[in-house]
Amino acid sequence: MKFPSVFRTAAPMRFDIKPRYYDPVKEEIDQRTSRIKRELQAEGLIKDGDDELGSYGGGIRGSFSQYRGIKERSSPNIFASTAMIRTFIFLILLGSIFGYVYLGPVIFEYMLYVALLIGAVYFFFRLKPKKKNE
């Protein structure tokens, strides 16, 4: 079971090797089909532009028709980003360590007052009724 972490840990590198395989029968079939295509093109039975890619064109065209683009966030919330939350936690920890070194245990009281003030301001603006023209 993995415990939640504030920092990202590196994943181990995976070894993935794709072996090369030579199939002489397939090679011979490819050479024969290309030779037959050239002969049919020389006789005029097949057009020069006829390739196997023509059959894939419709599928590719259809798959891009559903593209809508990258969706924008509906409400730009600064606390929605994981990186911002990590940054705030890091700054709070760093401030508490340096504050404890320079001011002593009284820094935790100050940090509690600051947190209560920030919480009060947040709830004031959150509970304040919105104007009708906005």
Image: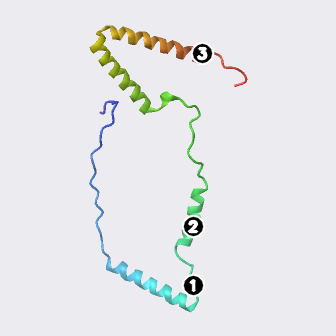
For label 2, the residue is 57
Q: Amino acid at mark 1?
A: Ile
Q: Give the mark nearer the N terminus: 3 vs 2.
A: 2
Residue 88 numbered mark, or none:
none
Mark 2: give few (<14), some (14-19) or many (20+) Cα within 10 Å.
few
Q: Quadrant of residue 89?
A: top left
Q: Quadrant of the N terminus?
A: top left
For label 3, the residue is 127
Left or right: 54 as drawn, with respect to 29: right
Q: Give the mark nearer the N terminus: 2 vs 1.
A: 1
Q: Which of 100 and 7 lies nearest the eye of the viewer?
A: 100
Q: Position of residue 76 (x, y in %)?
A: 55, 31
State how far apart marks 3 and 1 are (Cα).
74 Å
State how far apart marks 2 and 1 are (Cα).
19 Å
Q: Residue at x 45, y 83 (%)?
A: 34
Q: Quadrant of residue 107?
A: top left
Task: Kindly indicate whether the residue at mark 1 contacts the one at mark 3 (C-beta within 8 angstroms).
Answer: no
Q: Position of residue 25 (x, y in %)?
A: 34, 80
Helix, strand or loop for disc 1: loop
Q: Amino acid at mark 2?
A: Gly
Please determine whether, in this image, residue 8 is positioned above or below residue 53: above
Task: Kindly indicate whether the residue at mark 1 contacts the one at mark 2 (C-beta within 8 angstroms).
Answer: no
For label 1, the residue is 46
Q: Residue at x 53, y 29 (%)?
A: 77
Left or right: 78 as drawn, with respect to 15: right
